[in-house]
Each structure stands twice: as structure tokens, then as C-alpha cells.
Image (cartoon, rainbow, N blue to C red):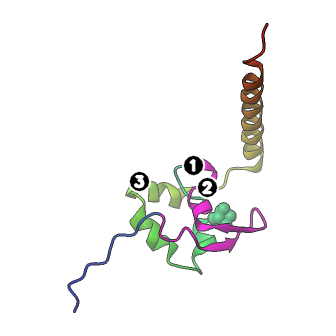
Amino acid sequence: MSDEKQAAPELGDHDALETRCPRLGGPVSFHYCRLFAGNDLPCWKVFDCWWETFDVAGFLKQALSDTAFQRLAESKPKPKMLSLVELIAQTRKNLSMEKSDTTEGEKP
Ligand code: SF4
């Protein structure tokens, strides 16, 4: 029996792995899935997409806080209409920020 302890997993341990994203239709890294859309939680499909590659549930259970893991396990996809509304709102916000950036230097 070895006295060596296993190192605790780091969040970035599997970031370089790649899989085909069923939502985007192309390859993505685990890093992308882990930081999906700038949220504090991985993509809600992370268990479905990665279970064949490595023990993603075991890894995230150790790497995330208990609260974060519970939120991820209970997360569900947003209805498409809500996602579209949020996407439109984000696009409008980005456009208005771009517009204010370009008009800041202009004289009245
Ligand atoms: S976890 Fe989400 S972002 Fe990652 S491959 Fe699956 S659907 Fe795509």
C-alpha cells in the first residue's frame, strides 16, 4: 500500500479534451463546456456529452463546491423561446455599447 495521497483534481485537468458538440455541430474542448457562455456552471449537458470520455460526474463532484454541483445536477435546458429572448437582449446590449463607444469621441 502506498502512502502517497492522490492530488485533488484541478478544474482545468481535462480542459484540453475535445468532443463533438451536439448543439454547435462541431468540436469543442472540455474547457468550453466547463465555462459555457460565461456562466459559473458548466453546460447543463456536460454529463451527457462527456461520460464516455472520462468520469465527468466524479470529476465535477470533486472539483465544484457541493452547492455548485447540486445546481448543475438540477439544471435543465431553458425553453428555446427564453433562450432567443435572452440572445436578442444580449445582442441589443452589445450593439448599444458599440454605438456609445463610437459616438463618445464625436462632438455634439
Ligand atoms: S456539454 Fe454543452 S457545450 Fe459541451 S459539447 Fe455538450 S452540449 Fe456542447
Q: Earlier in the sequence, mark 2 or mark 3?
A: 2
Residue 45 position, x and y percent, is 63, 64
For label 2, count other residues whose C-alpha is less than 10 Å away and answer few (under 14), some (14-19) or many (20+): some
| Quarter placement of the C terminus | top right
Name the residue carrying label 2: 36
Residue 32 position, x and y percent, is 62, 60
- Residue at the spot x=76%, y=37% of the render? 91
- Residue at the spot x=39%, y=67% of the render? 62
Name the residue carrying label 3: 67
Q: CA distance from mark 1 to mark 2?
A: 6 Å
Question: Where on the image, by quarter, is ligand 1?
Answer: bottom right
Quadrant of res 18: bottom right
Q: Is mark 2 within 8 Å of ligand 1?
A: yes
Q: Residue furthest top?
A: 108
Q: Are marks 1 and 2 in contact (CB under 8 Å)?
A: yes
Q: Total of numbered circles in the picture?
A: 3
What is the span of residues highlighted in magenta in the rendered image?
12-38
Residue 42 position, x and y percent, is 56, 58
Q: Which amino acid lies under the numbered mark 2 shown in the image of this protein?
A: Phe
Name the residue carrying label 1: 39
